[in-house]
Image (cartoon, grey):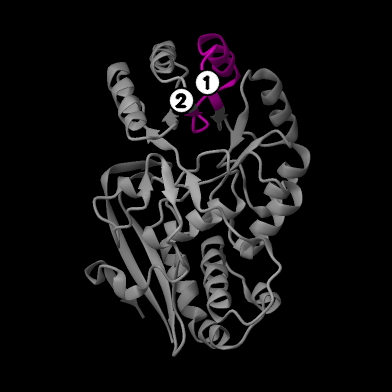
Amino acid sequence: MIAFYQYQLPFLTPLKTGAGDISSRKGILIHFQDADLDVIAEASPLPGFSRESFQSVSTDLLSIKTELDAFLKSLFSIEELYQFISGSPSIQFAISDLGRKIILTRGKQSINHPLFQSVNKSVLVNDIVGYHHTETTKRLILEALDRGFKTIKIKTPSPDPNLATVLRDVYKEKEEVKFRLDANQSWDEEKLKTFNRYFKNIPIEYIEEPYALQDDEEINRTLSLSDYPIALDESIADLNHLTKLLKKFPDLFVIIKPMMLGNIFELSETLSKYRSSYKRVVITTSLESAVGLETISYLAATLGDNSRAHGLNTGKLFRKDLITVDDMKNGILDLTNHSDSLITLDQLDQSMLIEIQ
């Protein structure tokens, strides 16, 4: 039997998005249970980033509830699952994830697919620091490094020379550090050139989304202008666009938010075909609950670059999550004890769930 639940997680501080500030993260869980199965997945568009809304996802899920329940009860194959998956990206993500977990739990078919290959038992994780006064920024970076993180992502609305000084000072103290600068498309070409001048001899892993990169010519020009690698995140429109980018730009970093791209089977096949070693593939959350984070972590271990840190340390942004999972120490997420039935509905804080009917 299938059921849908709404959750709402308050942020410690409001999240700034293109749709304005939001004080909490709202999402949907899909729970399927029968005599042998108890699985749960998440379908949670992120306001200001996703091209879908909570209301549209809720309405669409209710409209396919009977059909989805009947399909999940059947002894479907991977091929049949692939044909069944449809809808908006977050719905595709959730159905494909449910299907993956059910196939693994049943374990009665030979599986030759990237999603079912052996995964790394641990995943490197980056920490995130906002843009603050220089002394505050330095303190926050050093605190993250003292907690064991080696890669620090910094929101950078401007290539401020004072920030360059902070990063250079930190690097002198902690030579193992790597920085990622996320401009959130707030720069232009002149600011990129300014960045090249101010941030020399600092270990910058990449610059994420310096400005909107709409076509191949803009990407090529930006790659030629930048002294550092470039990463695309919100510029990746969909899986077709990702395929095109992987074909044409092998040196680009791609930041993958699986919830926004949809079918995780298609995502895995795309990455394994065009970036088989998964180099420069970074997997990150869309601020899902602990349920979604479990799947994103699995995908990071399966499809992500194992030499890079991934954006999985986002649970800290909530005052409270649906369940407390403490497997992250010293900037590493330990997956040794993870299984696909690790989180079940009865383990979650039921007071934070409302059934959608």
- Figure check: 219 above or below 319: above
> Neighbour class for label 2 at 10 Å: few (<14), some, many (≥20)?
many
Which residue, given by chain and number where applicable, does mark 2 sit on? 177
Asked if disc 1 and disc 2 are in contact, CB closer than 8 Å, the reply is: yes
Instruction: Look at 41% across and 56% down and name the residue there.
Output: 288
In the rendered structure, does residue 189 fall within the stretch colored magenta? yes
In the rendered structure, does residue 211 fall within the stretch colored magenta? no
Residue type beneath disc 1: Pro
Residue 117 position within the rendered picture, expressed as x and y whole percent measured from the top left: 64, 62
Residue 197, by quadrant, is top right
Residue 337 position within the rendered picture, expressed as x and y whole percent measured from the top left: 42, 61
Instruction: Look at 75% across and 30% down and name the residue there.
Output: 217
Task: Please name whichever residue, 47 or 29, is drawn nearer the observer in this view of the structure.
Answer: 29
Q: Using residue 272 as the reference point, say whether residue 206 is left or right of it.
A: left
Residue 218 position within the rendered picture, expressed as x and y whole percent measured from the top left: 70, 29
Quarter of the image that includes the N terminus = bottom left
